[in-house]
């Protein structure tokens, strides 16, 4: 399961830093993401985290830096936050090699209110990791949906692995793309990133500590992010469930996972034998599990790039892009409602007339519910 953006574009062989960040997004509004369907309004804010105890894999002379987008339920209404900055957009458009305005992604409309107050109560937490070379913004559609349904969501931007703006105005692209080492090394660093984010959110003095239900914490992601979710479940027992959206598993040889896990594969990648590492990992998952394959989809279909590519006139899969996003939302939400909310969504039990594109590859061998 590669991380290329399929027909949308190939990842650039080398990404140069863009001009300093700080330019305001353009006033004209562009493509509008699907509105979240939950009953809550959604707020959003960003965090800059620095792990002073850990060197960056790509630049060992530097401490590891992360940017985190937090989506959460709120009662506030107001102006929606930008999808990404104009400078991040310019780097990402260049990376994709697409025929689009440099500020295209800065004009994409979201639903989350910037800086809104967090709703009262303890919120279950979902930590997300994007695919290799994918900005964390490409999980906005999923993050907003989960927040509208009562979850706090932390989408992690892994420095040098995708376009990312830092608070000092620096915007770096995927500087690691040309020299990426073995997938296991990336997965291991990302797993450490995910644990560090949870450390910071739950530390004494954190503004988030009082908002989070620390007994209900899930982790998941797309592509390399899904692999990192699988890895961190083996090393950090604070995460109690995980999911992988079409990601190869780089640690599957000896990798027992004792937590509920959902595998979502694209039409080709999700076929047993094509799913890198899945066949080895599957019998090592000892709790509730599902392996589903989605027809008419490709690798990037489980991100915002599915509807965005339709808007750009370069669709990346047979399925309509907005339906692909809606399907991703439906199955991830159902999984989290089951594992963190003690519900029993029927779409996880087998084929559905609502989502006929979904095939259950091995439901008969799933472990009993925990």
Image: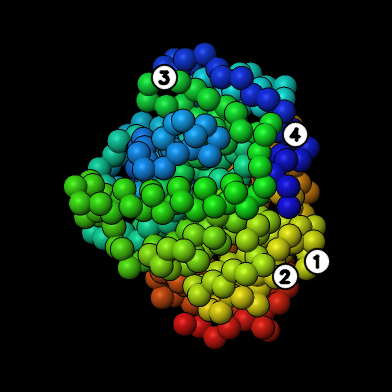
Residue 188 versus residue 131: which sits nearer the camera?
A: 188
Distance from label 3 to label 2 (Cα)? 44 Å
Q: Residue furthest left?
A: 205
For residue 278, what is the image quadrant?
bottom right
Q: Is residue 213 visible?
A: yes
How far apart are the alpha carbons under marks 4 and 2? 27 Å
Name above or below for residue 339 compared with residue 123: below
How far, Cα to Cα, is label 1 from label 3?
Answer: 45 Å
Secondary element under disc 4, as helix, strand or loop, is loop
Tell me whether the residue at label 4 lies in contact with that at label 2, contact meaning CB atoms closer than 8 angstroms: no
Residue of label 2: 279
Residue, disc 4: 10
First reached walking from the N terminus: tag 3 or tag 2: 3
* Image height of 355 relative to 6, above or below: below
**Can you identify the residue that label 3 sits on?**
169
Report the Cα–Cα distance between label 2 and label 1.
7 Å
């Amino acid at each position: 399961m590669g991380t290329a953006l399929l027909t949308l574009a190939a990842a650039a062989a080398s990404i140069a830093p863009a001009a300093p960040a700080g330019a305001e997004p353009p006033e004209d509004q562009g493509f509008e993401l699907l509105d979240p369907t939950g009953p809550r309004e959604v707020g959003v804010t960003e965090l800059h985290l620095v792990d002073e105890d850990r060197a960056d894999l790509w630049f060992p002379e530097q401490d590891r830096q992360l940017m985190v987008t937090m989506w959460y339920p709120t009662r506030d209404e107001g102006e929606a936050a930008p999808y990404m900055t104009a400078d991040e957009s310019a780097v990402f458009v260049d990376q994709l090699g697409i025929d689009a305005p440099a500020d295209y992604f800065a004009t994409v409309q979201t639903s989350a209110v910037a800086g809104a107050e967090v709703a009262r109560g303890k919120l279950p937490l979902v930590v997300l990791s994007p695919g290799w070379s994918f900005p964390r913004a490409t999980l906005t559609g999923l993050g907003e949906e989960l927040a509208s349904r009562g979850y706090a969501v932390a989408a992690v931007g892994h420095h040098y692995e995708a376009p990312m703006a830092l608070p000092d105005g620096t915007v770096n692209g995927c500087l690691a793309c040309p020299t990426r080492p073995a997938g296991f090394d990336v997965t291991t660093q990302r797993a450490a990133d995910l644990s560090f984010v949870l450390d910071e959110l739950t530390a004494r003095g954190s503004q988030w500590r009082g908002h989070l239900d620390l007994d209900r914490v899930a982790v998941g992601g797309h592509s390399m992010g899904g692999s990192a979710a699988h890895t961190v479940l083996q090393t950090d027992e604070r995460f109690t469930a995980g999911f992988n959206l079409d990601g190869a598993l780089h640690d599957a040889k000896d990798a027992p996972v004792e937590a509920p896990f959902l595998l979502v594969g694209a039409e080709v990648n999700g076929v047993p034998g094509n799913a890198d590492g899945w066949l080895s990992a599957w019998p090592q998952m000892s709790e509730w599990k599902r392996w589903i394959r989605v027809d008419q989809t490709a690798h990037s279909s489980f991100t915002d790039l599915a509807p965005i590519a339709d808007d750009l006139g370069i669709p990346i899969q047979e399925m309509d892009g907005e339906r692909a996003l809606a399907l991703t939302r439906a199955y991830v939400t159902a999984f989290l409602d089951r594992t963190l909310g003690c519900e029993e969504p029927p779409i996880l039990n087998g084929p559905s007339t609502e989502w006929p594109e979904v095939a259950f590859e091995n439901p008969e061998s799933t472990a009993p519910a925990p």
